[in-house]
Amino acid sequence: MATEIPKTMKALLQPDPASTHLLLTELPVPVPKPGSTEHLVRIHTAALTNGELLWRHNFPLPSSPDNPTIFIPLYDIAGTILTSPPTSPFPPGTEIYTRTSYTRTGSGSQYTLISTPELAVRPQKLSWAESATVPMSAMTAWQALFMHAGLTPSQDAVENKGKTVFVMGASGGVGVWVVQLARWAGVGVAGTARGENS
């Protein structure tokens, strides 16, 4: 049985798009209509990351393409696909997690639109809340190790043997991913953490 999609949804809105502060108001807004390459996703959880807070202090919040007065924060989500393009490898009912683009309105709402390249199937071992915290932290850790530090992203990489990374804040959102990915790649790890987190 197809899920009935409402005309409006609850969303966290930032009243002043020029503000760097997240002063949120919950108001009903139109449910977005998917384009030919977009999936409509029902959001179960959304995460506010430290990266998003830092980004807000340097750039204005993007507005909704359907309504320039709507500014919705939050970009890391976990949810269920309701509608898919005909050729999508992610059919309706697929549980996903993703990070949406900073160049468009966020996903602090009941529904959002996601294109195929942005989607990944949610690991069933993780709760909905845990799934929503993965995208930004894991992506940042991956970029730090394999794009900026020059390590090879492989369990069998000979180039990584004998190398060690130092992780300042190894118990933080990104730090825990750096530790795990570095160990996966055969790299030694040394790190710091506050006493209560070690």
Image: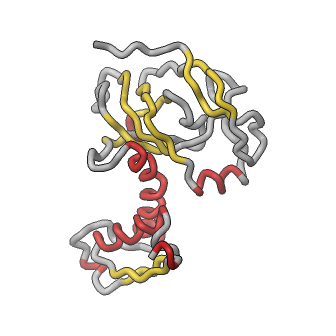
Task: Classify 25 as above or below 133.
Answer: above
Task: Classify 173 as above or below 21.
Answer: below
Which residue is farthest front? 196
Which residue is farthest bottom? 162
Residue at 35%, 46% in the rendered image: 127
Task: Classify 6 as above or below 126.
Answer: above
Q: Nearer the viewer, residue 104 or 40?
A: 40
Side of 161 relative to 62 (left or right): left
Q: How many marks?
A: 0
Task: Classify 177 as above or below 15.
Answer: below
Side of 60 relative to 130 (left or right): right
The image shows residue 43 at horizontal and vertical percentages of 45, 33
Q: Nearer the viewer, residue 95 or 40?
A: 95
Which quadrant would residue 30 be assigned to in this image? top right
Which quadrant would residue 54 be assigned to in this image? bottom right
The image shows residue 76 at horizontal and vertical percentages of 49, 45
Residue at 36%, 28% in the rendered image: 81
Residue at 28%, 82% in the rendered image: 161
**Image quarter of the N terminus:** top left
**Image quarter of the C terminus:** bottom left
Task: Please name the colour scheme applied to the rendered image.
Answer: secondary structure
Residue at 53%, 43% in the rendered image: 75
The image shows residue 59 at horizontal and vertical percentages of 71, 48
The image shows residue 87 at horizontal and vertical percentages of 30, 25
